[in-house]
Amino acid sequence: MKNLLDVDDLAKYLKLKKQTIYNWLNQRKISGMKIGGVWRFDKHEIDKWLKSQSRNIKK
């Protein structure tokens, strides 16, 4: 599936360290699924989560 990212892919996509991804998983800030012992993330769900985290700044 093209829309599934592993931890390395997600870290690159978000420009974060892999440890941050693991920390967020542990803190339940993001959700993923383990397939064959490897964490996978749906890119569409990550994009939705990112939008929900954005703040509206009034000028």
Image: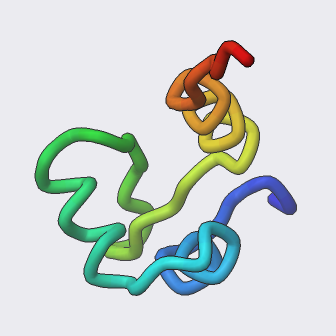
Viewer-side residue, 5 vs 55: 55
Question: Taking 15 as reference, is 54 above or below it?
Answer: above
Instruction: Locate residue 14, reporting x and y percent.
Output: 61, 67
Could you say which is closer to the camera, residue 10 or residue 3?
A: 10
Task: Say which quadrant the N terminus sits in.
Answer: bottom right
The answer to which quarter of the image holds residue 3 is bottom right
Q: Position of residue 43 (x, y in %)?
A: 71, 49
Residue lying at the far left of the rendered structure: 26
How is this picture coloured? Answer: rainbow
Please identify the residue farthest to the front as the structure is shown.
59
Residue 56 vertical placement versus 34 (above, below):
above
Residue placed at 28% from the left, 40% from the top? 29
Q: Is residue 20 left or right of residue 1?
A: left
Query: At which x and y percent is residue 31?
Result: 38, 41
How many numbered tags mark residues here?
0
Residue closest to the eye, 16 or 28: 16
Q: Quadrant of the C terminus?
A: top right
Q: Position of residue 54 (x, y in %)?
A: 59, 30
Q: Residue at x 60, y 78 (%)?
A: 15
Query: Is 17 situated above or below 38?
Result: below
For this orientation, the residue located farthest to the right is 2
**Lateral position of residue 32 relative to residue 13, left or right:** left
33 over 55 or under it: above or below: below
